[in-house]
Image: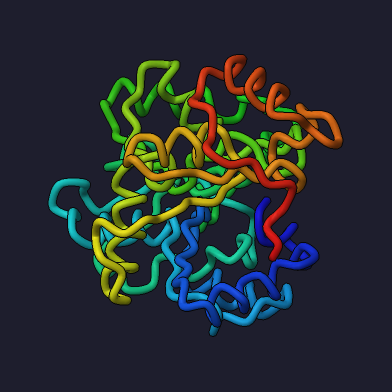
Amino acid sequence: GVLHNGKDAYKGVAECLQHLKDAGKPCVILSNYAGRSQQVQEKFLDVGIDPAYITGIVTSGELAHNYMARNQAKLGTRALWISWAAPDRRGLRDFWKDLDGYSLTSDVNEADFILVSGVEALNAGTDDEVLTSFEKDRDRAPFTKVMRAAIQRKLFMLCANPDLEGVRLGSWRPGALAKLYEDLGGQVKYFGKPTTSAFEAARLVLEDAGVPWDARICHIGDSLHHDVAGSEKVALDCAFVVGTGVHRKQLPDNPTVADVDALCREVKVPVPQIVLPRFAW
């Protein structure tokens, strides 16, 4: 929503990142992507962004992966995985690499926890994988029986991408599925924006690059719920990108401050300090 549309970088993005680097302003990418950070770096090359302009990358998937690596004794070893369809799974095919000891199951009665990384494939990675249309129509039917059984067993759900919708409106994401689990009575642990731990992870990358903890940092994002509200929680200024992000259809083509203020009141989030038409120099 800020840097690229999945296929190409938005106009001016690569040049802006280069100018920021030349000006000595480190940039860390904080992304609600359910895969590993390395996948994002490789994606940048595909869309025309030079990773050399970027100081570091923190993804919600990397945070989930790190949590699982540290907490196997707490979680258990058998995961029921909800993801994207094979073979590539939108870059998640190698997510389980370096997570020794874990196994995938299609039987909710054998599972120790649920991991939701996508919304397209139930029982992902097993011979009993079931494809769903949740991304397009939010049809909960394929998941409801499994979720109710999981809640009866008090299974924890890990959500590796808390986004509700993609840049294309009506394109539902893992956060919408996790919310369904919560609405049914289940417990969910989220990774990524707007959690404070995600922003602090990005701050640590900046600190390792020599940026003081009390430096003036601006977070740039396109989601009122994840970027604006999340940065407010950790006392960071936020530049809200309106022209290429998830809210662009909810605003006029050339929104005024009053338009943005009204939308913020409607969705009950703080008003951002800065509004940008797009991420460009």
Which of 55 and 259 lies nearest the eye of the viewer? 259
Q: Is residue 46 visible?
A: yes
Q: Is residue 229 left or right of residue 100?
A: right
Which of 143 and 108 lies nearest the eye of the viewer? 143
Q: Residue at x 31, y 58 (%)?
A: 201
Q: Residue at x 73, y 77 (%)?
A: 48
Residue farthest toward the right in the current orientation of the protein: 253
Q: Residue at x 67, y 42 (%)?
A: 166
Q: Is residue 278 left or right of residue 238?
A: right
Return the x and y of residue 280 as percentages of the image width and height: 70, 62
The quarter of the picture where residue 15 lies is: bottom right
The quarter of the picture where residue 173 lies is: top right
Return the x and y of residue 227 as percentages of the image width and height: 50, 41
Whether 198 is drawn above or below 281: the answer is above
Quadrant of the image for the C terminus? bottom right
Q: How many marks?
A: 0
Whether 235 is drawn above or below 8: the answer is above
Which of 174 and 245 lies nearest the eye of the viewer? 245
Return the x and y of residue 88 as percentages of the image width and height: 63, 67
Residue farthest toward the left in the current orientation of the protein: 73
Whether 71 is drawn above or below 236: the answer is below
How did the renderer colour the structure? Answer: rainbow
Return the x and y of residue 64 as percentages of the image width and height: 35, 54
Q: Is residue 128 visible?
A: no
Q: Residue at x 62, y 78 (%)?
A: 18
Whether 172 is drawn above or below 97: the answer is above
